[in-house]
Amino acid sequence: MGSLKRKSPEEETPTPAPTSNIQYDCLHEVSYPHGYVPASSSTTSDSSSQTKEPAKKFPFTLDPFQSQAITCLENSESVMVSAHTSAGKTVVALYAIAMSLRDGQRVIYTSPIKALSNQKYREFKEEFSDVGLMTGDVTIDPNASCLVMTTEIWRSMQYKGSEVTREVAWIIFDEVHYMRDRERGVVWEESIVMSPKNARFVFLSATVPNAKEFADWVAKVHQQPCHIVYTDYRPTPLQHYIFPSGSEGLYLVVDEKGKFREDSFHKALNALVPAADGDRKKDNAKWQKGLVLGKAAEESDIFKMVKMIIQRQYDPVILFSFSKRECEFLAMQMAKMDLNGDTEKDNIEKIFWCAMDMLSDDDKKLPQVSNMLPLLKRGIGVHHSGLLPILKEVIEILFQEGLIKCLFATETFSIGLNMPAKTVVFTNVRKFDGDKFRWLTSGEYIQMSGRAGRRGIDDRGVCILMIDEKMEPSTAKSMVKGAADSLNSAFHLSYNMILNQMRCEDGDPENLLRNSFFQFQADRAIPDLEKQIKAFEEERESIVIEEEDSLKDYYNLLEQLRSLNKDVRDIVLSPRHCLPFLQPGRLVSIQCTSNDEELSPIFIEDQLTWGLIISFERIKGVSEDDANIKPEDASYKVDVLTRCVVRKDKLGKKSYEIVPLKEHGEPIVVSIPISQINTITGLRLYMPKDLLPLEARENTLKKIIETLTRFKEKGLPHLDPEEDMKIQSSSYKKASRRIEALERLFEKHEIAKSPLIKEKLKVFQRKQELTAKIKSIKRTLSSTTTLAFKDELKARKRVLRRLGYATNDNVVDLKGKVACEISSADELTLTELMFNGVFKDIKVEEMISLLSCFVWREKINDAAKPREELDMLYSQLQDTARRVAQLQLECKVQIDVDTFVKSFRPDIMEVVYAWAKGSKFYEIMEITKVFEGSLIRSIRRLEEVLQQLIEAAKSIGETELEAKFEEAVSKIKRDIVFAASLYL
Amino acid sequence: MRGIQLQLSQTQKLRLQKALEQLESLSSKVNSDASVTIADSISVNHEDGVLKGHGTADLDGEVVATLCGVVERVNKLVYVRALRSRYKPEVGDIVIGRVIEVAQKRWRLDINYSQNAYLMLSAMNMPDGVQRRRTALDELNMRCIFEEADVICAEVRGFQHDGLHLQARSKKYGKLTTGQLITVHTVFSEETKTTFPSSSTVWAANAVRVLSTLGFVITLEIIQGVIDLSLSVNLDIHDMLGSEFCVLVAENEAERRSSTKKRR
């Protein structure tokens, strides 16, 4: 959709300064397979490319990287193009398609997402006409020369040996960096490894630093040269700003030349600190109920932000957040804003109802549909996976037409078709990745910020990072200025994959493993590791120590003492015991930041300093049910005033280093974990209320030093664990007794009196560490030289044999043939259910409802329990799943039985049951709280599973069951859930 | 004795009988009660529920066999594997077929199945190894690749809407030029994961003949064994089909199976 229109002729006028040309030059390299002779091909291809007419002429001058890539295509050699989203990679794909059509070859274009495939289909169809589309949902003209499909479809076509595999000359993998996706990444590896040997590839990827490695792999697996064209070029340069929460302005941190502005970066962070302090309580409240109520009373940050953007004419703007709920919540805060004129409103309404026309009248009344229009008319949009697919597409279209000025989107919007805005805002810098909240990686940041700046319209794109958390400056900086994520393999095995490989006539799962990118990356590390071992060993040999034995003895004693001391400290400093004593003004001794981490401190005393406690705070937990954790179990951060040295490394990364009080440095309040406190004294000092002025802090530190000198002779009054802190645990008593015993041993030790003992010990410790390092490297080395996943493959094959899916000779058996067909759900559990006859006796609706457990993965907290019949079925499913998991465990497949069983969720059983019974969509939405889009996606996926089950039933000759599955499909495949995409 | 037609001397008869008995005793325990004839009822536990597969039917609440054969059970699925049946192709099988027609974009092959199989022009690699769409010219030249009565080896790809389709994914499939084609009954073949013997010589052919006379399962391993045996006793090809060699093979096979059995 109109992604080409950005290439208007004006932009070709050489506006950029000549310097930029040099900067934007692309990198071109070639990977040759081992023993390949490139000479002949280059000479012949040169002559041929001169004679041949270019397959496609573009109405604009190509960027260097584009023409470079196209030259490779004309030489009929594979190419990997790594560039930013907006740089214009599509040109390369278009040329490859045009070239294949010219030469009468087939070409396949695969993308990671169905929606993207739909959009690309439309784009190519307008351009070339001989184009077909195959996704799980639709198939259009499968005999066309150019086929657009999802990568999963391409994989299964290869397993089935579709004739396309023998006619395809060019395979285009778009967004190939998806290969690092934990769940689906493996599909790319399978597809690439199994691709026909004579085919050529076009890989389009975001910027990845290890593009060369990827190309080397392709060259090796397919024995053909693979070119790499890499460019950092952005057609519109970016400016990065920081918006500290609660502040009034933006701070430019990276200008359009890519220069990091240290000074304004610090200004931004300073603007944040007081705001964050005052905001803390509010912040907590927001977590709990803010999402529902909203902060209507005051103008929220986001409102201010949008207002500012509109005032400065930075619109259109995309505001990224990382959850669907947050996205909606933020959009609700824009209630007072109206960004569109009357004519625009009319247009929006017209487009909107045109699109909604394909829905039934009942569906048009869905709350999501009717609530969306007023919002859209004001120029505000929401885009996330919870929306009805049709709404999502309307919003995309409106956005492309410029009718939406302000779009709240989730990360999914950053992948795929060219839908740029002038400005991109990150409303949050942390993201939940399935296990925990983490900072955005620089790669994700790059991907999303790539949406900023419209080519040919804006002279620069604007990127705004909203920081509202306590964020280490270094983290912020590495996010904004960091490198792209490298492309790493996320290979893993599945039973479906193993069975399909076994069934392939010359397929051997081990072949796949051997050719995988995972193995390639592991192999590549070997020489490096060997070199490391050698270096370490040499270093170890060079260290000579006299009296090594007694030194070793002494060292071991010290080690023991240290670990005991640590035990004691852990007990004393456990939040349960020490929290009452962490009052402001308490004098504590803390450990200095050790700058050479390699030598772990045996001599703690050397590295202690003193500080005053200001406050302590709980670290925000992972999940929202944080409140349930008892105060004792949570982890805490203590703010301490002490002397620090502020350092900046080469990247300008700021780091605070705690140093002894008497050294040079600034008095600064730093946050440290409790474990960094060494001892808590019985003293509390008076502290000025306002610590902001430097003087006040300096004076306080002076006071500390004074106190210390006063107590020098007597020693500071430490809090006694037993008397003052009332610690009565037996482990504490035991540890303290052993410490006493050890200390007596020390006195007897001769070597302790040696004058150079400390130096000697340090040397000895270094030696010990080297030995340990060598050992660990050797371990990784031995695990990489053997085939990765070999053990797991063995274990999984064992499971397949035990369950009767395959025979001892690795021949796929009846059950295996069923499992071969099932790729969209857990193949083992589903096959077992089928062979246990569970589907046989139950009604079609119940069966559909049961199958919904296989496709629903989201967690709903207070979902109603399904009715009794359904619940019985669900427990049957759980039993089967548990058996399957248990057997896998017995066969030494690493699996957590409970998590596996719980991964089948009954939350939408009731809803899907109602849908299968023929309820209207608005009716089923009333009985559940899930997002419309999520539900639709699940039902579509359910239909996919049913189609696979039909195939499976056919292959074992179960006609009754086959008919039942067919009936099930007809029951669920209707109305809005299967409404066709607007792009088709 | 399964109607073996050989001219045997008295001692040969005795030896053969002994060898066959030994073989039978080895396999008899496995599924003696599982063999059924038509209308035999198959005992199932109805409480657990059953899935009725091929060769079974429901008769007054009882599961009965509709075929003569062996009852096989997979979890709750019950089906009867027929003793004698026509070959039924499964995805991934390697089959040999004879071209009976060169049609549009496809060859029609007889593979001894109830239908003819199709090998599409696009389902095999072009002789020059180039990946491209097939043109009209390629279609006209199809006879240069295979013509009527050629014997072709290919892999079963699966059932499409218009029939059974084959494919030839790699170079080792294609026209079989030397050797002879022997048709063997399906019952004797067994699913294994082996590659097809590319060197079909008279030796192998005769070996297969010997085995099928004896009614043994034919696998590549056993064929190889028979050939080795004939070489070790320095036998002429023509004598391979003689009665003495048959008896020898039977004895050898009995010994081999009992030894593998012991090892387990």
Image (tube, grey):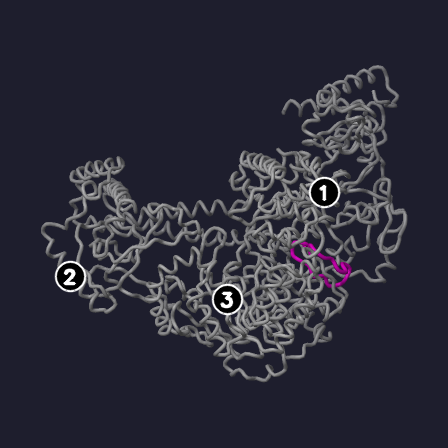
Check chain identity for marks 2 and 1: say if they share one: yes
What's the amino acid at mark 3? Ile
* Numbered tag placed on residue A506 in the rendering: none
Range of the magenta residues?
A135-154
Disc count in the image? 3
* Numbered tag placed on residue A952 in the rendering: 1
Residue A200 visible from this viewpoint: no
* Numbered tag placed on residue A703 in the rendering: 2
Q: Nearer the viewer, residue A164 or B11?
A: A164
Helix, strand or loop at mark 1: helix
**Residue under mark 1: which chain is it in?**
A
The CA span between labels 3 and 2 is 48 Å
Of the two numbered discs 2 and 1 in the rendering, the one whose residue sits closer to the viewer: 2
**Which corner quadrant of the image does residue A822 belong to?**
top right
**Which corner quadrant of the image does residue B28 belong to?**
top right
Residue underneath mark 3: A446
Check chain identity for marks 3 and 2: say if they share one: yes
**Residue under mark 3: which chain is it in?**
A
Percent x, y for residue B86? 84, 35
Query: In the figure, A503 relative to B53: above or below?
Result: below
